[in-house]
Amino acid sequence: MPERSAREFARAWQEMLAARELDRLSEFLRPDCVHEYPQSGERFVGIANIRGVFENYPGGLGTQLIGSLRVADHETPWAMAPNFTLIRMTGAGDSYTSAVRARYPDGTDWYIVSMIELKDGLMSHATMFFGPVFEAPEWRKPFAEAEAGS
Amino acid sequence: MTGAAGETRDVIARYVRAVHDQDLDTMSALQHPDFVEDWPQSRERIRGRANFRKIMENYPGGLRGSAADVSMDRVVGGEDRWMVAPTFTMVRVSGAGDVHTVILKLRYPSGEEWFMVGLYELKDGLVYRGTSFFAPTFESPEWRRDWVEPLG
C-alpha cells in the first residue's frame, strides 16, 4: 500500500464509499480500526463490524450528489468526491477532519463531520458526528446572512 | 507545548473557555477583526464580532449557565489532544498549523444535549474563521446493535 497523504486518503475513502465498494474496506481500514459515534454512545471495532453497519443501514447508505458547496472563502484545502460532497478538510499528516453533506434515502440532508486518524496509511480511528440541516431561526436573522454558494 | 503550534492551541483553549464562560469580552478580544463564523446546517454566516456577540446575547433562554456534565471519557483520543472546560466540556482538539477542530458537548437551556464540532482557523494569532456543526444526542438504533459496543 503506497503511502497516501491525508487528502489523498480522504478523497479515495469518499469515492470508495460512494461506489459502495465495501470489499475494499481493508484497503482503507486497519483490522482493529475503531469508529465512534459519540451522539449515540456507540463504538464499532474492526472491519467486520464497521461493514455490518454500512451494509445494513435502513434504506441503504445514503448520499447523492448535492453539488459543490462552499462554506466560506477559507484558505484551507478543499476536496470533492462524486457522491458525497466533501466540503472542507483540515489537518495534516496523520489526522484530518472532513465535513461532507449527504442525502439519506429518506430525502433528508445531513452533515457528517469526521475526525479521522491514520496510521501507516490506513484509518485507525474515526469519530463521527451527524448534524441535520435546519431552518435558520427567525430571532437571529438580523445578525446573520445567508451563506453564498450552496 | 512550545512554539507556534502551542501558541495556536493556547488561543483555541482560551477561546473555548471564553465561550463556555460566555465571557463575551474575551471572545471578542480573541476574534480577528475580520472574523466570520459559518453554520452550514442552517446556511448562516455571521460576519464580524458585533453580530456574533449579538447572537450570544440574544440566544433564547440564554447561554450562560449551559452545562455539560458528561465525562470527556466518552470519546477517546490521544491524551495530548484533550482539554476540559468546566461548563462546556471540550472533549477534543486536533489539528496542525493554524487550523484546529474542537468538539464540545453542551447542554442548552432546554436541557437537550448536543455536540458542537468547530473548525477554527487562526490568523495573526486570533480566531479568524469558524465553521461549526451541531449534532444532537440520540438513542443507539436497534438495527445495528449486533455490531456495536457502548462507548465508555
Image (cartoon, rainbow, N blue to C red):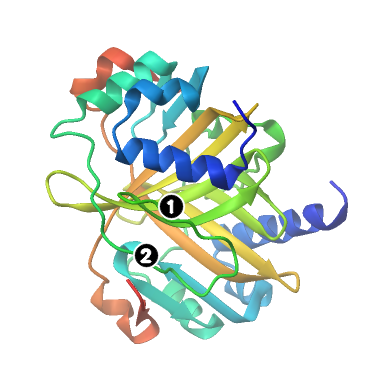
Image quarter where the C terminus of chain A lies is bottom left
Determine whether B66 is above or below B147 in the image: below
Q: Residues at badges 2 and 1 in contact (C-beta under 8 Å)? A: yes
- The amino acid at mark 2 is Pro
Q: To which residue does mark 2 refer?
A: B40
Chain under numbered label 1: A
Seen from the viewer's position, the closer of residues B9 and A94 is: A94
| Callout 1 amino acid | Ala
Regarding residue A79, the answer to whether it shows in the image is: yes
Residue at (65%, 43%) from the top-left corner? Answer: B83
- Residue B78 is situated, as x and y percent measured from the top left of the image, at 66, 31
Residue A137: image quadrant is bottom left
Quadrant placement of the N terminus of chain A: top right
Residue B13 screen position, x and y as percent: 68, 55
For the point 49% across and 33% down, the residue is A126
The image quadrant of residue A46 is top left
Badge 1 is on which residue? A99
